[in-house]
Every structure is written in C-alpha cells, then in structure tokens.
C-alpha cells in the first residue's frame, strides 16, 4: 500500500473561493466515515439482530445481510457473520463509484480539497494514479456494477417476500424496505458505467439507443443525490430493524 507523505505548508488550502466549500468537505467526509464505522460495527458485533425473524411476524432482513446465502451453505460458523460472503460487492461498488471517489479524495485525502483549492504541497510528484492497491480497484467499477445489479434484484425480492409471506403484510419496516430497494435502483441506474453499458457504448447509436442514453443521462445528473439517498435508506432500514429487535421501537402493521 502506498504511503502518502504529508508536508503541510502555508499554501495548503489556499484559494480565492468565497463560498463555504469547507462545510460540504467536512459534512461529506464525516457522514461517510460514520456510515463506514456503523457498517463494520453491525456486521462484526451485532449481526444476529439484523437477520430475518428478529421482528415477530415480519420478514425483514437487514440490507447488510442480503442475499441470505446461509441456507445454501452447510456448516457455516455461527460466530462468523455471513455478510462477509456478500458485503464486499456493495462495498466495492460504492467504494469505486465515481461520485464516491470525489468525496473521499476531497474529504479524506484533501487531494485536492476542492476545485481551485490548493492541496498539500508535499503530495506533488507522489501521485501514482490508480495503479496501486487499493485504488487500482477503481478500474473495475463496471464489474462491481454487474454485481450491484444482481444485489438490487435481491433487494426487490426481499420487499416482495416481506409483503407476501403471510397473506399480505405491510408494516413500517415494509416502507423502509421499499425505499431501500427504490433508492438503490436509482443509484444503480444513474451510474456512469450503467449509462455507458446500456446506452453510451455505441459509436453510431440508433434512435432507441439514444433514447435510453438520454434517459439514463437525466438520472445521471442526480447521481450524487441518489448515492446519499440510497446510503441513508440502507442505514435507516437497518437501524429500524435493530431498534425493534432491542425493544426500543414497536413494529406497526398496517395490513
Ligand atoms: S459512478 Fe457511482 S455507482 Fe457508478
């Protein structure tokens, strides 16, 4: 792993910008790091409270644990969270996302801190592109997208199972499950690589291809927004399941 040498100089963060660029810089970085810590904590220390069945009567499963593959693997160690089987895929997808790169390059590495803002002087000349671990993984975003599409289908599958497992069941958690699948779908379909694959890879696009490209492009303009909405919907849905499992909230069934 490359080591970045920091050489703080008086020119760091020098800029003529008058807007409040530091606030978004801090807010995005803080939110991202908090989500990462939360994700690791629930997967490592509290995985038994995110699984199907912890909300009596309902079929909710934390989005961190889908799809549930444990039924297909015999002898899985009880103490090992089965999320390790699948979680690398959505983490890889988000971690290599073009929008996400902008967030962590700016907020965590200050490289650069923002448009027209001076970064750390000592970093110049050390840039190695995305050729070293873990940054070379960013070149495989398209492949993580394929996995994310499969995972997105499983998120919708969970919504359907949750609704139809006992006649028809719709509770508060069903709404969170739906929002999770919905925003994840928007996040995936607004992806830059998705646009390239499904509408932008042809040099002579036909009318139909162009229409698809234009449609995805309009979604792509809000990709950053969908990134956050999808992340928060996963977070809130998981937190809701845990709060009910801990007895701090009571599930309400509407139907
Ligand atoms: S560019 Fe963000 S998910 Fe593909």
Image: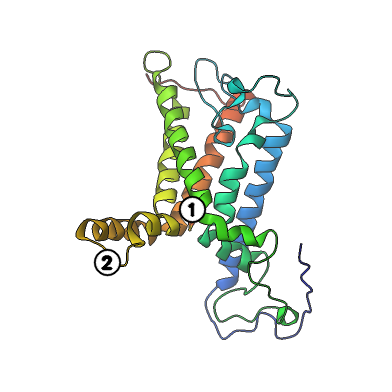
The mark closer to the camera, 1 or 2, is 2
Q: Residues within 10 Å of mark 1 (few under 14, many from 20)?
A: many
Residue appearing at x 57%, y 61% in the figure: 139
Q: Sequence-wise, which precedes: disc 1 or disc 2?
A: 2
Does residue 169 lie above or below 239 as drawn? above
Residue 80 visible in rendering: yes
> Is ligand 1 within 8 Å of the beta carbon of the residue shown at mark 1?
yes
Residue 71, percent from left and from top: 59, 20
Does residue 238 lie above or below 123 as drawn? above
**Quarter of the rendering containing residue 241:** top right
Q: Are marks 1 and 2 in contact (CB under 8 Å)?
A: no
Quarter that holds the C terminus: top left
Residue 110, percent from left and from top: 66, 71
Residue 174, percent from left and from top: 44, 28
Residue appearing at x 61%, y 54% in the figure: 31
Residue 35, percent from left and from top: 62, 48
Q: Residues within 10 Å of mark 2 (few under 14, many from 20)?
A: few
Residue 79 - label: none
Residue 170 visible in rendering: no
Mark 2 lies on a secondary structure that is loop
Camera-side residue of 16 and 149: 149
Residue appearing at x 56%, y 82% in the figure: 116
Q: Label 2, on which residue?
A: 204
Residue appearing at x 28%, y 55% in the figure: 212
CA–CA distance in space, label 1 to label 2: 31 Å
Quarter that holds the N terminus: bottom right
Q: Label 1, on which residue?
A: 227
Does residue 1 lie above or below 36 as drawn? below
């Amino acid at each position: 792993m490359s080591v970045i040498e920091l050489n703080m100089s008086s020119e760091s963060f020098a800029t003529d910008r008058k807007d409040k660029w530091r606030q978004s810089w801090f807010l995005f970085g803080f939110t991202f790091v908090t989500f990462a810590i939360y994700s690791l904590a629930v997967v490592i220390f509290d995985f038994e409270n995110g699984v199907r069945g912890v909300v009596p009567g309902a079929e909710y499963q934390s989005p961190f644990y889908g799809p549930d593959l444990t039924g297909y693997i015999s002898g899985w160690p009880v103490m090992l969270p089965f999320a390790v089987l699948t979680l690398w895929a959505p983490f890889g997808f988000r971690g290599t996302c073009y929008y996400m790169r902008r967030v962590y390059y700016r907020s965590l590495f200050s490289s650069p801190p923002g448009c027209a803002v001076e970064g750390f002087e000592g970093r110049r000349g050390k840039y190695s592109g995305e050729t070293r671990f873990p940054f070379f993984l960013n070149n495989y975003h398209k492949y993580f997208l394929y996995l994310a599409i499969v995972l997105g289908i499983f998120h919708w599958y969970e919504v359907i199972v949750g609704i139809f497992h006992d006649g028809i069941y719709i509770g508060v958690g069903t709404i969170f499950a739906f929002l999770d699948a919905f925003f994840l779908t928007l996040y995936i379909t607004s992806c830059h690589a998705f646009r390239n694959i499904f509408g932008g890879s042809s040099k002579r696009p036909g009318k139909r291809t162009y229409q698809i490209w234009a449609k995805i492009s309009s979604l792509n303009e809000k990709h950053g927004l969908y990134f956050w909405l999808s992340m928060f919907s996963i977070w809130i849905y998981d937190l809701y399941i845990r709060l009910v499992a801990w007895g701090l909230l009571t599930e309400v069934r509407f139907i």
